[in-house]
Image (cartoon, rainbow, N blue to C red):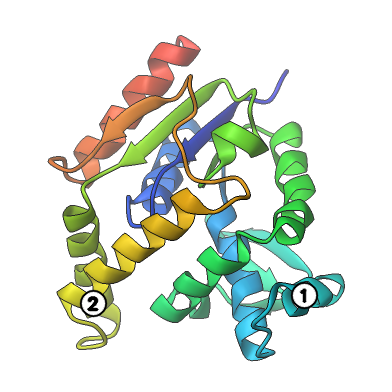
Amino acid sequence: MKAINIAVDGPSGAGKSTLARRLAARLHYIYVDTGAMYRAIAYHTLRCHAETEEAVTALLPVIHVSLKYEDGVQRVLLNGEDVSDVIRTPEVSMAASRVSAIPAVREFLLGMQRQLAAEQSVVMDGRDIGTVVLPDAQVKIFLTASAEKRAERRFLELEQKQPGAQTYEEVLADVILRDKQDTERETAPLRQADDAVLVDTTDADLDQSEEMMLAVCREKLGI
């Protein structure tokens, strides 16, 4: 039976990881968080103080990123070390945006991502899944929300983990900057695929957003 691929793209803070994970669970597919792969590389470059494209590229041969699932939860391993939690800081987020613009980094992870999608039915989220990584995906969703709403959600999430770490205004500035970096980069910029369905969750809660995405899948897949 041919694997079914669902591509979920969208800007930073749109809730792609949370919603793609929930969608995968509803459909009994494997969830693949490509953003976590880039974050793992970014985390390693920060630890190694690699600040230029040449320095980051030179590190790739000694980096191994893998995903494993424990009780249905995806864990991210960097050279065997579980970095699932430490890669979720604002600093790593901004670094991930920078390293993901490096062609060598994207090529490094592209084969791994496509192999996962060829072997099993997946819900894969990122910035260029429907446009570059899985251009033949049976379902493509472009998930978005206003910058203000995305910043609000991220701020509340951050407050739970690290109270006082950032103000709402700082989080909003980060979201706007990340959008600019992602849409203006030369390599695989963030854009909605021509055949992707736009799902705007600005005025929807988590459950409503999940149902919106599930409705798209049911229509496209006839399930």
Quarter-of-image position of residue 166: bottom left
Quarter assignment of residue 41: bottom right
Residue 154 is tagged as none
Q: Circle 2: is it few (<14), some (14-19), or many (20+) Cα within 10 Å? A: few
Quadrant of image for the C terminus:
top left
Residue, x 76% and y 35% (percent of image)?
119
**Residue 134, image x, y percentages:** 64, 33
Element at label 1: helix
Q: Along the line of sight, which residue is nearer the eye, 124 or 107?
A: 107
**Three-letter amino acid code of the residue under disc 1:** Glu
Q: Residue at x 22, y 62 (%)?
A: 151
| Label 1 vs label 2, nearer the camera | 1
Residue sticking out furthest to the right: 61
Query: At 73% from the left edge and 54% from the top edge, which residue is drawn?
Result: 109
Left or right: where 217 falls relative to 172: right
Per the image, label 2 sits on a secondary structure element best described as: helix
Q: Position of residue 38 (x, y in %)?
A: 61, 63
Q: Residue 159: horizontal and vertical position, in percent?
A: 21, 78
Asked if residue 122 can be seen in this view, the reply is no
Label pair 1/2, CB-CB below 8 angstroms: no
Q: Quadrant of the N terminus?
A: top right
Query: Relative to residue 78, is residue 22 depicted above or below?
Result: above
For image coordinates 67% across by 61% down, the residue present is 102
Asked if residue 201 lies left or right of residue 98, the reply is: left
**Which is more N-terminal, label 2 or label 1?**
1
Question: Which residue position is annotated with label 1?
Answer: 54
**Residue identified by numbered label 2:** 170
